Amino acid sequence: MSLEEALKAAEDELDHMREVQEARKAVLAAEEEAIHKQASLVNSLRVALSRYMGRDLGTLGPSGVDLSWVSMPRTRAVQRALEEIGRPVGPAEILRYLQSKGRSEDQSEVISATLAHLKRSGLVENQGWGAWVATAEEVHTPY
């Protein structure tokens, strides 16, 4: 085998190893998403069953998710996240925080729209690009 052939074989092997690594990353990401979706489904079913039965089945689901976060309206969840984080943050960080609380259905674009709505209501304010905070009190606006 010549040096050129050996180099070509080594490069081909490196390319193959990178492809395998990327495939593993994709599988792990898909597994993580499936787990998150299943946890959200379980939590949603738990909340629905709790409401149907007219009694509290507990505030924590089997995966330790606080069901109050899963069942609260998105506007309240975004406002509460800002209150709990306690510093200026952007929509992506709010989304990660909500997802850590079991709200897997929320998306970044929806968080941005919710922030705009909360701003009109005086419940949050923008302190610069991507820097949102909760305000102390609600201000009623005509829209």
Image (spheres, rainbow, N blue to C red):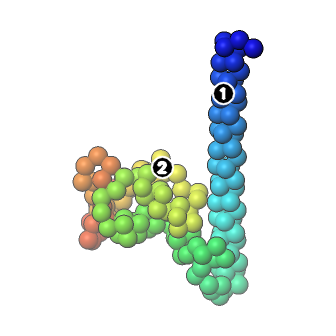
Residue sticking out furthest to the right: 1
The amino acid on which the numbered mark 2 sits, given as a three-letter code, is: Ser
What residue is pinned by disc 1?
A: 15
Q: Is residue 126 visible?
A: yes
Q: Position of residue 48 (x, y in %)?
A: 67, 74
The answer to whether mark 2 and mark 1 are in CB contact below 8 A is no
Instruction: Tell me which residue sits at (48%, 57%) in the image.
Output: 96
Q: Is residue 126 above or below residue 18?
A: below
Q: Nearer the viewer, mark 2 or mark 1?
A: 1
Residue sticking out furthest to the bottom: 55
Count residues near mark 1 (Cα–Cα under 10 Å), then give few for <14, some for 14-19, many for 20+: few
The N terminus, quarter of image = top right
Closer to the camera, 89 or 112? 89
Looking at the rendered structure, the secondary structure element under dot 2 is: helix
The amino acid on which the numbered mark 1 sits, given as a three-letter code, is: Asp
Instruction: Tell me which residue sits at (70%, 84%) in the image.
Output: 53
Q: Disc 2 versus disc 1: distance between alpha carbons?
A: 34 Å
Q: Quadrant of residue 35?
A: bottom right
Q: Quadrant of residue 93?
A: bottom left
What residue is pinned by disc 2?
A: 108
Q: Is residue 18 above or below residue 120?
A: above
First along the sequence among labels 2 and 1: 1
Q: Is residue 43 left or right of residue 91?
A: right
